[in-house]
Amino acid sequence: MTGTDKAPLEDVTVSSLTLRGFTRNGLWATGTDRLRVQGVTAEKNGRWGIAEQRSVRSVLSHNVLEANGDAGLFVSNTAGAEEDARDARMTVIRHNRMAGNRVGVTVRRLRNLTVSHNEAAGNCVAVFVVGDGSGPAADGLRVPHNHLYANNKHCAATPRLPFLQGTGIVLTGAEDTLVAHNRVESNRGTSPLSGGVVIRTGFVGAAHKRNAVRDNLVTGNGPADLADRDTATPHTFAGNTCTLSEPAGLC
C-alpha cells in the first residue's frame, strides 16, 4: 500500500489474512491515513510481519505476529533514510500477540502513539522504542497495559545493535514517554539491553528527557527489573512493584 505525504492513501482496512513466508515483509504500508490492520496473522516473513512508515492515525489491532526475522510490528517515521521524528497523530497498536520474533514491536522516531494491551513472549525484545536522532524528538509515546513475559530468545548483534536477549521494554533516545500499568515478567539475559524495563542512552548519543515508568508489575527479570542506564538525565520511577533495580532504589 503506497501513498505520499501530499496524497496519502486514506481509509484502507486490511483484515482476516494470513501473510506467511515472504522474503521481506508480510504487509508494507507507506503514506497512509487511517489505515486499519486487524485480524491478520503475519508469520515467518524475512524481515517485518506488519510494517508502516510515513503514516498517521493508524490502528493495528488483534493481529498475530510470529517468527518474523526482525520485528513482528514495525512503525517508523521512515525506514529507508535518516529523518527527524514524525507525528503519528494518535496511531494505536493494541491487542496484538507477538511471539518468536527478533522484536515484538519496534517504534522508531515517532511522536503521539500508543502501544497498549498487547501480549509478547518468546521474542528477543518485546517492545523497542527508538528515538535516536535530532529534533523534534520521539515523544508523546504511551506504553500501558501490556503483558510481556519470557522474551528470552537470543538474537545476534548487528552493525547498529548489540546482541539482544531478555528485554521487556527498552527506550533509547526517547522523550516524554510513559510506561505504565504493564506486567513485565521473567525476561532475562546478558545483553546491554537485558532487563524488565530499560532506559538506555541512545546509540547515536541522543539524550533522554522526562520519561516516566509508573505503576508497573516488574518481576523475575534479569539482570534487573528496572534499569536506568542513561547517565545524563534523571527519569521518573514511581509506584512500581519490583525486586531489583539499576541503580538501587528505583523499586
Image (cartoon, grey):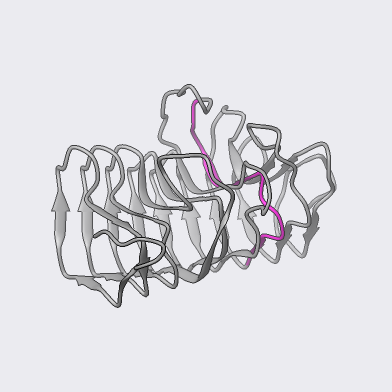
On the rendered structure, is 202 left or right of 99? right
Residue 47: image quadrant is top left
Q: Which residues are magenta?
A: 163-180
> Quadrant of the image for the N terminus?
bottom left
* Residue extending furthest toward the bottom: 11
- Where is residue 110? Give x, y as percent: 55, 56
For the point 62% across and 41% down, which residue is it? 132
- When the figure is inspected, residue 157 is found, relative to residue 92, above or below; the finding is above
Identify the residue at image location x=35%, y=54%. Answer: 98
For residue 33, side relative to residue 178 (left or right): left
What is the number of callouts on the image? 0
Q: Quadrant of residue 181?
A: bottom right
Task: Name the residue nearer the viewer: 15 or 64.
Answer: 15
Which of 232 and 197 lies nearest the eye of the viewer?
A: 232
Vertical comparison of 221 with 119: above or below: above
Q: Is residue 98 magenta?
A: no
Q: Where does the image place residue 147, in percent across and percent down from the top left?
A: 49, 61
The residue positioned 42% from the left and 30% from the top of the image is 154
Is residue 165 a member of the stretch shown in magenta? yes
Residue 150 placement, left or right of 9:
right
User: Which residue in the rendered view is the most extreme toward the front?
Assistant: 6
Towards the viewer: 202 or 222: 202
Residue 213: x, y in percent?
71, 59
Residue 70: x and y in percent read 35, 39
